[in-house]
Image: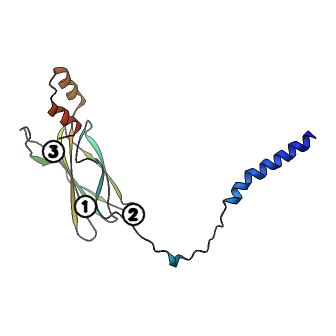
Amino acid sequence: MIKNKLISCTCVLIILGTAGSFTYATPAIRNVDTTKYEIVKTANQSLQIITPEREQSVSSSTKLVLEFTAPKDTKIKVRVYHNTSIEKGGENYVLINDPLLVDVGILQRGWAEIELKRGSNKIEITAEYKDGTAETVRRYVAVKGVEDVKRRILEGKITSEFLKDITGNK
């Protein structure tokens, strides 16, 4: 009696367990008329900077990975400038290194690791598209050391201008 109940419960569980896989199974080869459907490409047609996402940002690291998207076969040129002006608010940006060249492939994504200097840095990303047009995007990154912030806090020299500079809200 118990043996019959055990066998029947096992059979019911097996049937219920496999019923879902049979219900959702589809044939491997489907006859679909592809002439009804039009393939629409929604490719990104312009340069978009993913990292750093804001136009002005602050970092404590001197290395930055630049991430961007652009159409296939776009040539990207990255130039990094450092502000050498000693005046407060003055701008005298000087090119740090040779321009970095990146070719965008089929993934339509690109990455470049760049070296920054302490202080204010300007990053110019120029995209030269396949059709000959060009587009330039600029990002400003201020590299601040954590020890500088700690020293200013301990000295009590915190102004609203300093806090805006740290947070990148100018």
Tell me which colouring the rendered structure shows.
Answer: rainbow
Does 47 appear above or below 61? below
Q: Position of residue 25 (x, y in %)?
A: 67, 61
Q: Nearer the viewer, mark 3 or mark 1?
A: 1
Q: Which residue is mark 2?
A: 106
Q: Could you say which quadrant of the image residue 19 lies in?
A: bottom right
In the rendering, which numbered label is found on residue 152? none
Among numbered discs 3 and 2, the one appearing first in the sequence: 3
Residues at marks 3 and 1 touching, judged by CB atoms closer than 8 Å? no
Q: Residues within 10 Å of mark 2 (few under 14, many from 20)?
A: few
In the image, is 18 to the left or to the right of 138? right
Among numbered discs 3 and 1, the one appearing first in the sequence: 3
**Observer-nearest of 1 and 153:** 1
Name which residue type carries label 1.
Ala
Name which residue type carries label 2.
Ile
Q: Could you say which quadrant of the image residue 148 lies in?
A: top left
Q: Which image quarter is the N terminus in?
A: top right
Q: Residue at x 21, y 28 (%)?
A: 149
Residues at marks 1 and 2 touching, judged by CB atoms closer than 8 Å? no
Check the image and name the residue furthest to the bottom.
Answer: 35
Measure the C-alpha gap from mark 1 to mark 2. 16 Å
Q: Position of residue 18 (x, y in %)?
A: 73, 53
Q: Which residue is mark 1?
A: 127
Among numbered discs 1 and 2, the one appearing first in the sequence: 2
Q: Residue at x 10, y 42 (%)?
A: 84
SS state under label 3: strand
Q: Residue at x 69, y 56 (%)?
A: 21
